[in-house]
Image: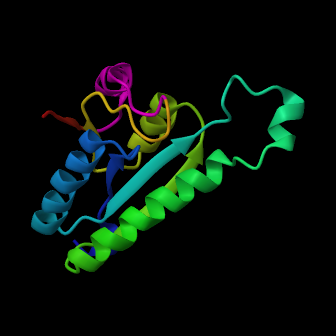
């Protein structure tokens, strides 16, 4: 099977140490199987922002998410040239985005209890939800 035909190993990534461990595991799996590694992060507008405040602030969670995941993908790709990496940044609830994406994934790899730079990204409840609802195998990387 060629690399183009292989479904990606999808890593839920929020910048936390557990999500970095999940990426390391997925990278090793990509080296063994030849599957590409998709580093997926989600973003949402903070719920404490009102309608007007969202437009008055310079804080852009989508830009923060994009910069974070693209930097991680650049670093991983430079260190592991035998694996294809790509970033995927999606607006939405992390657990729903991950489960939706799992329908096209070889497997889903998550860190355990990520409380990352982007608040509320991969909490323990997200891993549990994905294990129950994903359309592919799910691996939760523990400490």
Residue 128 appears in view: yes
Q: How far across and down, in percent of the image, does residue 52 sit?
A: 90, 32
Left or right, 120 with respect to 132, comes to right
Q: How far across and down, in percent of the image, does residue 61 sit?
A: 63, 45
As displayed, is residue 117 above or below residue 106? above
As displayed, is residue 131 above or below residue 73? above
Q: How far across and down, in percent of the image, does residue 81 sit?
A: 23, 80
71 or 132, which is in the foreground?
A: 71
56 or 140, which is in the foreground?
A: 56
Quadrant location, the C terminus: top left
113 or 1, which is in the foreground?
A: 113
As displayed, is residue 22 above or below residue 86? above
Residue numbers of the magenta segment: 120-136
Left or right, 56 with respect to 78, comes to right
What residue sits 60% from the left and 36% below the top? 92
Residue 122: within the magenta?
yes
Q: How far across and down, in percent of the image, does residue 47 sit?
A: 68, 24
């Amino acid at each position: 099977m060629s690399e183009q035909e292989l479904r990606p190993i999808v890593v839920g990534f929020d910048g936390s140490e557990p999500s970095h461990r999940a990426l390391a595991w997925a990278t090793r799996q990509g080296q063994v199987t030849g599957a590409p590694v998709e580093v997926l992060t989600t973003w949402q507008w903070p719920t404490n922002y009102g309608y007007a405040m969202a437009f008055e602030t310079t804080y852009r969670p989508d830009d923060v998410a994009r910069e974070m995941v693209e930097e991680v993908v650049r670093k991983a790709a430079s260190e592991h040239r035998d694996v294809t990496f790509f970033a995927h940044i999606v607006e939405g609830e992390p657990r729903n985005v991950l489960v939706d994406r799992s329908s096209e994934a070889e497997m889903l790899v998550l860190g355990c209890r990520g409380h990352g730079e982007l608040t509320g990204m991969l909490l323990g409840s997200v891993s549990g939800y994905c294990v129950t609802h994903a359309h592919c195998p799910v691996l939760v990387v523990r400490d």
